[in-house]
Image: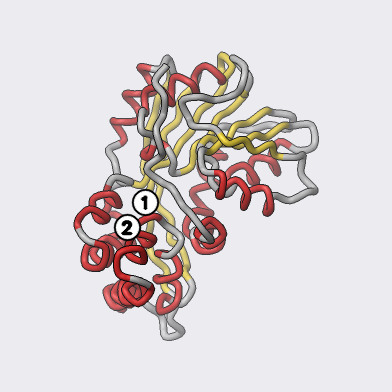
Amino acid sequence: MAEETESGFQLTGSAPERYERYVAPIMAPFVEAVVDAVDLIPGATVLDLACGTGFAARVAAARVGPAGRVFGADPNESMLKVAEAHHPRMYPDIEFTMAPADQLPYADDTFDAVVCQQGAQFFPDLGAALAEAARVTRPGGHFAATMWASLDKSPYFTAQHRAIAEHGGPEAAANFTAAFVPAERLTTALRRAGFQEVTDREVTFGIALPPLADFAASHLSAVPWGQTIIETDGQEALTSAGRLVHDLLKTHTAPDGTATLSFTSTLVTAVR
């Protein structure tokens, strides 16, 4: 089995806590969609693969109830610390483990469902990661993942890409665009890993964002490309990048500064 090197999505310092706060509004409807797609029932056992700060794990825990079990795996220790701190205690405990996607510490046929919310596009070895996902999913179990659809289908990300290019440079911009990949990349890898009934479709949500004058820079500070801007040119450059995002989206902005923008993701499902 290939050894997974560092994920393409790494956060350090206080960025994971900011991720939990500022990325949540964008992720929320897609988290519900990816969990809906695996048809969870009370008592099911679920893995949130590349769980980050635990968005999908928390939703899954609410669905499977006290008789269920939920696990989260991610290679980023700082993200997992935030996940541990934020998971609600009234649900069954969520067991978070630091592990790369291609070296999962679970027995064969463990999970009724595996979900992966905006993580698969960052796996250094997608084939190896999905082979592991297939190994730990029981026969007949469900897999679902979301990845952002093409960049031009999400106005906020289009504006963010321009800001990253101007203030973070071409390498940061290229790393950002790596998050937007064709569905065929994932569906082909799933079939090669042994999954069946592989489907993909685009899902679009209109998402209400807080006043963009402050939110745009705060959101950038919570993702790797914003960290690159800070490391390269400092906090003022990040502030300028956030201002540019805001300016580019002025026509979408309400009088109170908020904006409701469309975001489009590809939802891929499969059966083991």
**Residue 3 x, y percent position in the rendering:** 41, 24
Amino acid on which the number 2 mark rests in the picture: Ser
Image quadrant in which the N terminus is located = top left
On the image, numbered disc 2 is attached to which residue? 154
Q: Give the Cα separation between the discs numbered 2 and 1.
A: 6 Å
Residue closest to the eye, 64 or 54: 54
At 51% from the left and 53% from the top, the residue drawn is 29
Q: Secondary structure at mark 1?
A: strand
At 45% from the left and 30% from the top, the residue drawn is 269
On the image, numbered disc 1 is attached to which residue? 264
Question: Crowding at label 2, few (<14), some or many (≥20) Cα neighbours within 10 Å?
Answer: many
Q: For this view, does 123 lie left or right of residue 174?
A: right
At 38% from the left and 65% from the top, the residue drawn is 261
Question: Crowding at label 1, few (<14), some or many (≥20) Cα neighbours within 10 Å?
Answer: many
Query: Disc 2 or 1, which lies upstream in sequence?
Result: 2
Residue closest to the eye, 186 or 63: 186
**Residue 48 x, y percent position in the rendering:** 57, 36
Q: For this view, does 61 lie left or right of residue 39?
A: right
**Dots 2 and 1: beta carbons under 8 Å?**
yes
